[in-house]
């Protein structure tokens, strides 16, 4: 074993801990399934694709309006890919979890690292949510019922969205987001900065800290649900538990959902099915179940 660089991990062990594809032998099956299910969802569900929320190449989002005419709760989903890969088009399938219950679903894109830095990537996601809030009526959404979730790096971004000072960021009410869910998310970027991922992410110590949800706990917020697969590595569990503890110490509502038998890819696949354990938990959070 080499010299520890984070907790008891040396560089090789830390790299292994965050190598999700190395841990799940059939990961390619799930990535292909996400793509196939997403293409099918876009064919079958009415949608507005590649709507601009900002001037940058990555600043687009897809809207899947709820059935019916009444203003509908809005669910904003943020995709993962370690901030450097994948696209909103790979995750259109999440519409199947929420739209049948009456929600409008918005899946957002952002510029991938290293084409921008983490500060800008987080800013883009905040700008996307601000756009959704300000334009909700144009697609039949109810801005007073706006929820967020995200998987993996998207879980990190969902938590950063929950910690946003909306009056300072965009002159919006403090309670823009009603509640949120991080799914197998990353909430402490220090080990990310120290492992193989930083060759692309290029995080410095200060940037990693100010973009770590464990260090940006808001003074007030709606409830946060943190789901993590029981088969995830120890670091994913540590990250989840530490964010939950940080929120709870601040007196904020935060619940951990440890999902037995789920790995980093199967847990996201739960959102293909509105009857799955994870989908039902998020729908309950939204008041739709």
Image (cartoon, grey):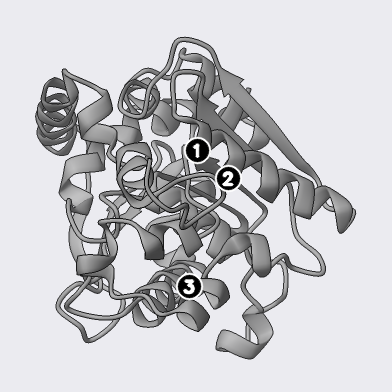
User: Which residue is drawn at the image coordinates 38% and 26% (left, top)?
Assistant: 271
Tag 2 and tag 1, C-beta contact below 8 Å = yes
Residue under label 1: 236
> Is 203 rendered above or below residue 91?
below
The quarter of the picture where the N terminus appears is top left
Q: CA distance from mark 3 to mark 2?
A: 14 Å
Q: Position of residue 9 (x, y in %)?
A: 46, 45
Q: Earlier in the sequence, mark 3 or mark 1?
A: 3
Q: Is residue 218 left or right of residue 56?
A: right
Residue under label 2: 239
The quarter of the picture where the C terminus appears is top right
Of residue 230 and residue 149, the one placed in the foreground of this image is 230
Residue under label 3: 208
Q: Is residue 168 left or right of residue 141?
A: right
> Is 125 rendered above or below residue 149?
below
User: Which residue is drawn at the image coordinates 12% and 29% (left, top)?
Assistant: 40
Q: Quadrant of residue 56?
A: bottom left
> Is 208 rendered above or below residue 170?
above
Q: Is residue 76 visible?
A: no
């Amino acid at each position: 074993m080499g010299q520890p660089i984070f907790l008891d991990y040396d560089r090789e062990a830390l790299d292994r801990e965050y190598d999700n594809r190395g841990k799940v032998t059939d990961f390619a099956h799930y990535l292909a399934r996400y793509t196939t299910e997403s293409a099918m969802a876009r064919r079958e569900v009415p949608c507005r694709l590649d709507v601009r929320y900002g001037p940058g190449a990555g600043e687009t989002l897809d809207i899947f309006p709820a059935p019916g005419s009444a203003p509908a709760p809005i669910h904003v989903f943020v995709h993962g890919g370690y901030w450097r890969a994948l696209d909103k088009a790979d995750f259109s399938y999440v519409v199947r979890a929420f739209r049948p219950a009456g929600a409008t679903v918005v899946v957002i894109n952002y510029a991938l690292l290293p084409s921008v830095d983490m500060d800008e990537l987080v800013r883009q996601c905040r700008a996307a949510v601000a756009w959704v809030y300000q334009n909700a009526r144009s697609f039949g959404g109810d801005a007073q019922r706006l929820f967020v979730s995200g998987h993996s790096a998207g879980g990190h971004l969902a938590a950063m969205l929950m910690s946003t000072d909306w009056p300072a960021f965009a002159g919006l009410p403090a309670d823009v987001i009603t509640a949120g869910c991080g799914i197998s998310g990353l909430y402490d970027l220090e080990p990310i900065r120290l492992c193989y991922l930083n060759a692309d992410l290029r995080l410095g110590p200060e940037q990693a800290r100010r973009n770590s949800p464990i260090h940006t706990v808001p003074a007030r917020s709606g409830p946060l649900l943190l789901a993590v697969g029981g088969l995830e590595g120890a670091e994913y569990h540590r990250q989840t538990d530490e964010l939950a503890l940080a929120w709870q110490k601040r007196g904020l509502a935060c619940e951990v959902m440890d999902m037995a038998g789920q790995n980093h890819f199967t847990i996201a696949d739960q959102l293909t099915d509105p009857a799955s354990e994870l989908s039902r938990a998020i729908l309950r959070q939204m008041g739709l179940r």
